[in-house]
Amino acid sequence: MASTTIAEPRAYLQAQMRWRWGEIAFWLATLLPFIVTPDYLLLASQVAIAALFVLSLDLILGFAGIVSLGHAAYFGTGAYTAGLISKWGWGEPLTGLVTAALAAGLFGYVTSFIIARFRHLPLIMITLGIGLLLQESANSASWLTGGFDGLQGIHTWPILGRFRFDLYGYSAYGYALAALFVIFLGARRLIHSPFGLALRGIRDNGQRMRAIGAPTHSHIRTIYTIAAMIAGAAGAILAQTTETVSLEVLGFQRSADVLVMLILGGTGRLYGGLLGAVVYMVARDQFSGLNPQYWYFWIGLLLIAVVVVLPNGLLGGLSLLTWRAKAQS
Amino acid sequence: MPPVFGVLFDGLAYGMLLFLLSVGLSVTLGMMNFVNLAHCSFAMLGGYVTVTLMNRLGWPFFATLPVAFVAAAAATVLLERAFFRRFYNATDLEQCLLTIGIVFVSIAAAAYIYGTDQQPVQLPPFLRGSIHFAGLNFAIYRLFLIAIALTITVVLVATLEMTRFGAQVRAAVNNQRMARGLGIDVDALFAVTFALGSGLAGLGGALAIDLVGLDPSFAFTYLIYVLIVVSVGGLGSIGGSLAAAMLLGISDIAGKYYVPAIGSILIYLVMTVLIMLRPAGIFGRR
């Protein structure tokens, strides 16, 4: 009897962790831009960076239920750290990436003590406040960050000493995609662990989780720190591949954009955010070619439509459709 | 005039403006817990109504103010019927996203119709210039702003404290379910309060043009200030909103005047720390 009660959750987690055909197809499809659309590799690298950033937000919002309007703070910390290291003469990308992720993680760890104590409106206001605070600080500290003009003089060395960053974006996309895949594997493993289940418990009913003895605050601190590290890595890749960092990396707009991508794709599904990032970035590229000024009109309409029509995002809508099709047959 | 009085006076006028912009949101948030991030879009609508009526149709400034109020209130009623109504029981996140969507649309629409430039207004002559009193110099428009805001505060407090409508609103803010149980039609009450609150924001938007300007980014820039006022002052508290708006207005002007390098950081720092210490606001009870 005792063995089955222990084996059942383990079997459940293992069943969840099994790779599905759709997932394998998705990751194979990420290689297509190299062959099919080699002219759009720079855009593809932007998509991969956005996807990594969305993944980070999904971990805290989709799985732990922490609504954040200031997640760009960690993205920007990573971007500025990577940019500054390179500007000071160490342009090696991998060590720069790790350092930037650690710096963002450290900032995330410090702020997580505040985050863990709040829910609802105060939480939204505090995340917003932290984001604005950091952006204003970066603006004021122009001796360090270049202020409004952005950080100049970044030079990234070739990856592993071989793959030079070029105008076509082969290395940029390869680098961003590799980082996204490796980090995604980590996040996937994390979500399908007992810790991941505990996070979903906190999201769905924090009080009950505390009542059954789960250390909810320390769980939230852990996942928030991890998410901050991933956001920092995404920022670092942006800084390294574009070789510039502007104040915009810390902006409210970026925090709002990443939220839109996640909601568009569907929260708490790992792939939802990735899909949202692809749709959002490609659509922005297409629309801004037509009339850049009014892009936000369409995004606003899209946001309203998603919330009204598809509360679980594109992926949630899809799975509802397949579920209905199965139920009918 | 010694700068300290000037800073206090300007901060007071600015705070009054912030109070007008935010008091409606404070009441609606307190009553329904509906996170309406589009509040400042209604303020912006009021501003643009005034600009259009004055510059294209040649209306006098004062005649446009009631229209700004009514236009913002009417727009709210429409949106409340179409969208907001269905989201009263939704999560914070969904409410945030719906209303951010409305903000995006309103900003793009304003940019499409009016362009991204600052909109000019021509104040009537008797509101321009300044008067000397006790050796000090007071800008007339700011005095006018303070007077209007104080009048509205008195009217609001009197309405809430002395009328049947006000008693129902207070009951609904305190305990929505109990108020429903006593037969108060909270939904209808809320729709009216929502419209009145947005109308005040629209009026605030119209009055703000001369002080802080008007361009499509208004809906975002002032949203942040309004959220600070509401969450620091405490939901549903008019006195709290007034105090928080004064505090924010004076410290913002003082910060930018005395320590320009870190003036804007100071505001966000004060807000974040205050919310950490008192999550329900200075005067909040929950």
Image: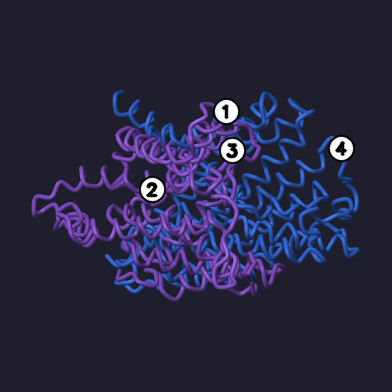
Chain colours: A blue, B purple
Q: Amino acid at mark 4?
A: Leu
Q: Amino acid at mark 2?
A: Leu
Instruction: Determine crowd level at label 2: few under 14, some 14-19, many 20+ residues with C-alpha closer than 10 A.
Output: many
Tell me the element at label 2.
helix
Which of the two labelled residues, at mark 2 and mark 1, occupies the earlier sequence position? 1
Quadrant position of the N terminus of chain A in the picture: bottom left
Q: Give the residue number, with chain letter if any, for mark 4.
A: A167
C-alpha separation, residue under disc 3 versus residue under disc 4: 30 Å
Image location of residue A104, percent across then percent down = 66, 64
C-alpha separation, residue under disc 2 versus residue under disc 1: 23 Å
**Relative to B169, B101 lies left or right:** right
Which of the two labelled residues, at mark 3 and mark 4, occupies the earlier sequence position? 3
**Residue at image coords 57%, 52%:** B211
Q: Chain of mark 1?
A: B
In front: A201, or B271?
A: B271
Using the rendered image, report if marks 2 and 4 lie on a common chain: no
Q: Give the residue number, with chain letter if any, for mark 3.
A: A24
Q: Amino acid at mark 3?
A: Ile
C-alpha separation, residue under disc 1 versus residue under disc 3: 48 Å
Q: Chain of mark 3?
A: A
Q: Give the residue number, with chain letter if any, for mark 2.
A: B200
C-alpha separation, residue under disc 4 versus residue under disc 1: 38 Å
Point out the frontmost of discs 4 and 1. 1
Q: Give the residue number, with chain letter if any, for mark 1.
A: B113
C-alpha separation, residue under disc 3 versus residue under disc 2: 55 Å
